[in-house]
Amino acid sequence: MATMLLFFVLTITKLSITTGQQNDSLISLGSSLSPGTNNSYWLSKSGQFAFGFYQQGNGFAVGIWLEKMEEKTVTWTPKRDDPPLPHNITLLLDVEGNLVLEDIRGRQVRISDASQPAASASMLDSGNFVLYNSDLRIIWQSFDSPTDTLLPGQRLMPRNGQDRLISSISKTNHSSGRFQLVMQENGNLVQYPVLSTGLSPSHQYWNTQTEKAGDNVTLNLDPNGQLYLLNSSGLIIKNINDAGRSYLGKNALYRMTIDVDGILRLYSHSLVQNDDWFVEWISTNNSCDPTGLCGLNSYCDLNGQQPYCACLPGFDFIDRDQKGLGCERNSSTYGCGTKMDERVTFEELTGIAWEENSYSVVSLDNENACLEECSRDCNCEIALIQNEKCQKQLIPLRFGKTIQGNDFLKTIIKVHDRSLTSTGNGTIVSRKEIKRGQRTDILIGLSCLSFAGIMVLVSVLLVCRNYLSPYKKVPSVGILMPEEVPTLRSFTFTELELATNGFTEQLGRGAFGTVFKGTLPNGQRAIAVKRLEKIATEGEVEFRNEMRSIGKTHHRNLLRLVGYCHEGSNRLLVYDYMSNGSLADFLFISQVKPNWDQRVGIARGIARGIMYLHEECEHQILHCDINPNNILIDENQSPRIADFGLAKILMPDQTKTITGVKGTRGFVAPEWYKNLPISAKADVYSFGIVLLVIICCRRSVDVNIPEREAILVDWVYECFKRNEVRNLVHDEEVDEQELERMIKIGLWCIQEEPTVRPAMKKVVAMFEGTVNIPVPPNLTS
Ligand SMILES: *[C@@H]1O[C@H](CO)[C@@H](O)[C@H](O)[C@H]1NC(C)=O
Ligand SMILES: *[C@@H]1O[C@H](CO)[C@@H](O)[C@H](O)[C@H]1NC(C)=O
Ligand SMILES: *[C@@H]1O[C@H](CO)[C@@H](O)[C@H](O)[C@H]1NC(C)=O
Ligand SMILES: *[C@@H]1O[C@H](CO)[C@@H](O)[C@H](O)[C@H]1NC(C)=O
Ligand SMILES: *[C@@H]1O[C@H](CO)[C@@H](O)[C@H](O)[C@H]1NC(C)=O
Ligand SMILES: *[C@@H]1O[C@H](CO)[C@@H](O)[C@H](O)[C@H]1NC(C)=O
Ligand SMILES: *[C@@H]1O[C@H](CO)[C@@H](O)[C@H](O)[C@H]1NC(C)=O
Ligand SMILES: *[C@@H]1O[C@H](CO)[C@@H](O)[C@H](O)[C@H]1NC(C)=O
Ligand SMILES: *[C@@H]1O[C@H](CO)[C@@H](O)[C@H](O)[C@H]1NC(C)=O
């Protein structure tokens, strides 16, 4: 083959071609093409393949396509993700031997990256565009950087840039789409969705099961339409298809393409009949198979062979004209710890599989028990029932798809309905079996106890307490009485009742209890009174000790405790009132968004506040619940961390283990739900997420924006990896170096492994620029 080629090349070397559309095949230096003219492409000898400009959208793209077919199939597009090219651009094989795009001002973008200069080029009949050196050896070829199609003679091998095909966005737009076929180093050929987090075995939806075949396995397509894997000794280890319409012999052309829909197809085209493409082989007959065909909170279902996306019950499409974008709840929810009495109902889907993303898995012998379990847990929005397990999931759910014949997979979805009043006490009132695709309410009368709402956090905090409870060691003698704590005042319940006008003006409701606005009679000082709820009665001594410890903290970035009340079962904390609300309000709700410098200042302040708690207090204080609702903004627009020290006060009698926490995508560090020891690094993790939220000025999960940006952590990481952190702040004016530094700090803080995360002291040093910030390691997902 190679000698044939060389011969062929040699015989036509003398034909120097400078114009296109001729089927002589050697292109000399200095040749050029212009889009939209008679000279816009070079043909292969047979006239079958063309290389040059083709129309894409309102502009042009460079690529290779089948010229003789009615529908000109594009087989290769270099720089496929660049914007469409204007008409005044030129494709040039320049005199230095580079293949470049040149604009009217002479600016060039290289297409080839050969290590030596080319002497000539050729569009071969195989569909390969090649550059030759002066010895007529191929120094660069389009076959080495495939896009979505493999042609006979081309191979995929586990090497950078040559190891995968990526589907196109649409039939008419050849930019990188959502699915890929990867020839892995372990010898397995695998199909995955394209995700910013990289390849995870759990996301693959097709493979050749050759993962033990060793190094350098390659995927090949021969001219008869046979797809096969070769191992490094050159032996065929697997035929992927039965050979194509072999009776067509040499009169057929084959291609294998990973199509827009994520399915791999081998096509043939008869050169004699000049027919359309015929599908010889397909990787799956279930169009819903490709992982991630539908967006967040939606699943792929089939109408005959036709796939379509459907929303979870209680959800609606983000954009009804683009149903692939995913769904969002069509009614707001109260969220954890903020539920009043409300009726919760459940709906059920069967036969749909989702990405495994449980924050808690409970073994149960029946389905009703799972419903009850989920209704008790305010974090539980969705649960999956399979294999006698109740898997509580976080929203958003991803990668939903119909699995035929798997009716035992059940998805139950909590639906909040405020219009109904509470009736029962957690038992299931009625339930109906439903088939997939239909919906039925499963009603649960439930007075959603506020206790249930905070139970989860309490249990988290209980763990926190167990890991750091210096006061257990404090002897009960020599404890300061409140009056001996100079800055802290002890209030009576009546005093606070008066100050808050009978607890009428509610400021917020958090995990620890409800906060009311109040005014102290002397000097009209505005205060916020937090009424702790559902706390198992604890020794007065310990409570006072805790107050004393909190009262001793003095830092400009901590919310100051003015006093407290401990009377009977009442526990109230009195803080300064912050008129600017919480950080969450400040970032997401306020009319005027804080600017870049303000945001960096706020992030720095929070870092300092946490460092103070971790390193500078008499006893280290772990916060355990850092999030934008727990950070307040004072009148100088400085951040003030609230709720620190409370982790230790909340100790229910029950020695319950963690039943659930906000998972990977919230603010809680992974060690919580892995039941690993909790250290100050858990706060560092939460800080990292808060930092990214502040920098990007958006929520950590936002389903109202394009799917790839929806999960902040993934999006940040993707932008960082691609050196495009600028995209994170859109067109806002920012100091780019500072932006990159902030992102690096954030990525260090959210490392999965706690020991890899920097201590808060180090984080503060990073902020101040006194230490170098190395490139953060990859995030594992
Ligand atoms: C392109 O070719 C056609 C026929 O071959 C000719 O009529 C036309 O003038 C040419 N256009 C240009 C811009 O050269
Ligand atoms: C050149 O291409 C035309 C049509 O594309 C074809 O009819 C002709 O035979 C080709 N010439 C050679 C020398 O291959
Ligand atoms: C192709 O799609 C990408 C991504 O959506 C877009 O940026 C680009 O402009 C599109 N190209 C054309 C020609 O429409
Ligand atoms: C080239 O074309 C583009 C779009 O058609 C236009 O915006 C640009 O100004 C042109 N460049 C020059 C130098 O004429
Ligand atoms: C695989 O290919 C690489 C690069 O071509 C080579 O260095 C390596 O030795 C090969 N491994 C085997 C087992 O052939
Ligand atoms: C290639 O496959 C053959 C047949 O399965 C096997 O005997 C040989 O050891 C393999 N070579 C390598 C390098 O794995
Ligand atoms: C798809 O269906 C065709 C025809 O029924 C069958 O020949 C083929 O084996 C199926 N492919 C897969 C991957 O199931
Ligand atoms: C939510 O969406 C469902 C289905 O689209 C619809 O039946 C229901 O009325 C919607 N509820 C609200 C509050 O919009
Ligand atoms: C609560 O449940 C018990 C049985 O578990 C039942 O006897 C009682 O009537 C229920 N209370 C309400 C208000 O439904």
Image (cartoon, helix red, strand yellow):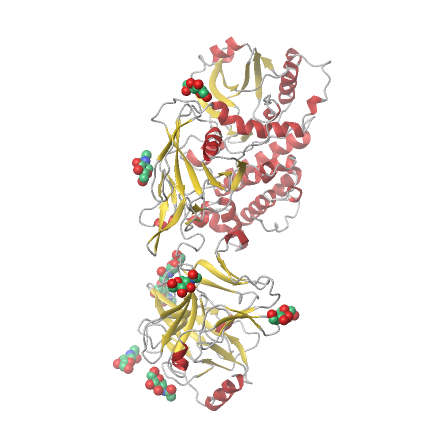
User: Where residue 560 appears, x then y in whole percent?
Assistant: 57, 23
The residue under the point 66% across, 28% down is 466
Q: Is residue 392 above or below residue 401?
A: above
Q: Give x and y (percent) for residue 741.
A: 58, 47
Q: Is residue 174 visible?
A: no
Give x and y (percent) for residue 149: 44, 68
- Asked whether residue 126 appears in the rendered view, the answer is yes
Foreground of the two, 555 or 464? 464
Vertical position of residue 705 compared to residue 661: above or below: below
Task: Choose between 554 and 629: the one closer to the eye.
Answer: 629
Quick check: 281 above or below 559? below
Residue drawn at the location 36% of the way across and 67% of the way down: 60
Q: Is residue 633 left or right of residue 613?
A: left
| Nearest to the observer: residue 429 or residue 616 | 429
Query: Going by the image, does 365 lie left or right of 672?
Result: left
- Which image quadrant shows ligand 5? bottom right
Picture coordinates of residue 765 (x, y %)? Answer: 65, 41
Q: With respect to residue 168, does 300 lie above or below?
A: above
